[in-house]
Every structure is written in structure tokens, then in C-alpha cells.
Image (spheres, grey):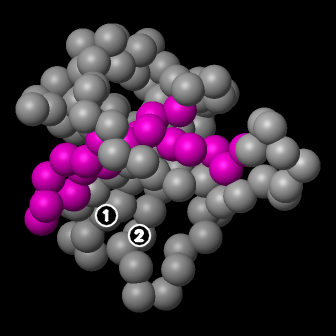
Amino acid sequence: MHEIKDVQQPEGEPRRRWFFDPAMELVVWFSDSNDIIGFQLVYDRPMDPHALTWYDESGYYHHRIDDGECPDTTAFKGIPVLMADGHFDFRRVGSVFITKSTEIDQQVADFVYDKIMRFS
């Protein structure tokens, strides 16, 4: 993964950093004191994308991403939607994350990896 620079910072929302790889994407949110307060890791892109989201105040969420495609119709593509998905293979995703995160901020990578491995 590599960091996307000059990420839009919406007013009133926590500062965020964005890291990207064709198979994996990570957004990390920071407090005013620069502590990580949340992240969303999208993995298994683009064929079967899922998202692991963690917030310091509410914990973990795991979702399958419905990309909005309607293969049997001529309808316009819809907006991607997060759909509840309980199974999360944290060992596999953690292993992939370790190999993909070698080029990003080490503190961010260590924090996210720790949270992946503590998923329950």
C-alpha cells in the first residue's frame, strides 16, 4: 500500500489518512491529539470486497460491500452499500495486511494489525 496525499478533510470530521493498494484500502481517523480513533480496512478488492471497521468508542464492524452492480438488468449502477457479514478470517487478512503495509507509516500499520488480530 502507499499513502494517498492531500486527502480531503471534511470540516467537523476527524482528520484522516488514506492508504491504497489494488487489493486493499485503508482509511484511518485521528483525534486532535493524533491518536487513532478509528479505521476502515477494505480487503479482497475488487472481486469480493469486505470491510473491517473499528472505532474506539464502539468497537468492530464487519461487512460485505455490495458494489451496486445489477448484472441482470440495464439499470444504472447503484451506490456501494455495506451489508452485514459476520465471518472474518482475521488470520488470513492479517497476513495479507502485513505484506501489503510495509511501505506505510509503521505506527499505523502496527496499530491496525494489532486490531485485526484482536478481532472477536
In the rendered image, residue 59 lying in the magenta stretch gets the answer yes
- The residue that appears at 78% across and 54% down in the rendered structure is 77
Q: Residues within 10 Å of mark 1 (few under 14, many from 20)?
A: some
Q: Is residue 116 left or right of residue 92?
A: left
Rendered view: 105 above or below 113: below
> In which quarter of the view is residue 64 placed?
top left
- The residue that appears at 73% across and 44% down in the rendered structure is 69
Rendered view: 14 above or below 82: below
Q: Quadrant of the C terminus?
A: top left
Magenta span of residues: 49-69
| Residue that numbered label 1 is attached to | 30
- The residue that appears at 44% across and 25% down in the rendered structure is 101
Q: Position of residue 24 (x, y in %)?
A: 53, 30
SS under mark 1: strand
Q: Nearer the viewer, residue 71 or 18?
A: 71
Q: Nearer the viewer, residue 67 or 117?
A: 67
The amino acid type found where label 2 is placed reads Arg
| Residue that numbered label 2 is attached to | 15
Identify the residue at the far bottom of this view.
12
Q: Quadrant of the N terminus?
A: top right
Q: Earlier in the sequence, mark 1 or mark 2?
A: 2
* Count of labels in the image: 2
Report if the CB atoms under discs 1 and 2 are less than 8 Å apart: yes
Q: Position of residue 86 (x, y in %)?
A: 25, 34
Rendered view: 44 above or below 62: above
Q: Nearer the viewer, residue 84 or 97?
A: 84
Q: Is residue 98 visible?
A: no
Rendered view: 35 above or below 18: below
Q: Position of residue 108 (x, y in %)?
A: 32, 41
Q: Is residue 31 left or right of residue 101?
A: left
- The residue that appears at 38% across and 53% down in the rendered structure is 28
